Amino acid sequence: MTGKVALVTGCSTGVGLHTAIRLAEAGYSVVATMRDVAKQQALLNEATRVGVTVEVKVLDVCSQASIEAAVADVMALHGRIDLLVNNAGAGFLGSVEQTSDADLRRTMETNFFGVWNLTKAVLPHMRAAGSGRIISVTSVGGLLGQPFNEAYCAAKFAVEGMMEGLAPLAQQFGVQVCLVEPGPINTEFVASVRSSSQAALATMAEPYATLAQRYMAASGNVFATHGQTGDDIARIIAALAAVDSPDFRTITSDFAMATVASKVVDRTGNSVIEAFANRLKG
């Protein structure tokens, strides 16, 4: 047993569910959070099947009150948070012209502001302890903008910038910051997003309708051929939690790496973090 405490968001399905299980297997006391705890049964069933225990707690990353209450409860019960996994997210497919202000704000609130606010709530406790690790699940969409994903990519780009700026500073306090950047993943969450997006795109007018259908058809082939599972990503997160000196950036597959290769020189991201950390050291 590690004796360490992990707080994981978005655990009702997919990457979050499997991450909670893998971390529990590794010996963490796992606080698995989700917006709607009525959806916890799949997680509990998997925990029973594997033979581990997880603690389920409500946490809506779009609510500051929910964030503060969840972090306070974890600290009151466990006295520490050693690992934060920012996994909760919301997908959206649509070009700038098809994206309403409400859709944009919802996408940014969940994918960026939720990460910002939860990290801000947890970081003081890690800093006081002089240790901790923050792992945020972004996407190749945080490195490479993609058609009909403008809002989603904007949010993931924002998380990437936030964490890249935070990492060398947090390092001075013994806190390590990492990014996990998957390409296509075949999970219930992604399937739901693609299904709802198909319905929205079906009503799209020209000149976007034909382009959208071409994009979705090509994307479907990519998911079928190169998609990873939620557990694939969870295993990567658990491995990052276990190593002494994790890379800042982990692109989760060769296909994802090939997708962003034209923009990424240092696939680990360590050189940027080290350069700024050296400035802080004087």
Image (cartoon, rainbow, N blue to C red):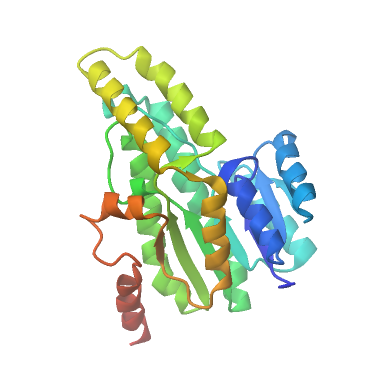
Residue 132 at least partly seen? yes
Residue 9 visible: no
Residue at figure coordinates x 41%, y 67% from the top left: 248
- Please tell me which residue is depicted at 42% across the width and 73% down the height of the picture: 169
Residue 222 lies, in percent from the top left, at: 35, 37
In the picture, the quarter occupied by the C terminus is: bottom left
Q: Measured along the vertical axis of the image, is residue 217 above or below residue 144?
A: above
User: Where residue 163 sits: x, y (%)?
Assistant: 41, 61
Whole-percent x, y for residue 84 in the image: 58, 60
Q: Position of residue 5 (x, y in %)?
A: 69, 65
Q: Is residue 81 above or below residue 206?
A: below
The quadrant in which residue 218 appears is top left
Q: Locate residue 249 relative to residue 89 in the image: left or right.
A: left
Seen as rendered, the residue at the extreme bottom is: 282
Q: Is residue 23 above or below residue 209?
A: below
Q: Name which quarter of the figure residue 6 lies in.
A: bottom right
Look at the image and tell me in which quarter the N terminus lies. Answer: bottom right
Q: Which residue is located at x 43 percent, y 17 percent?
A: 199
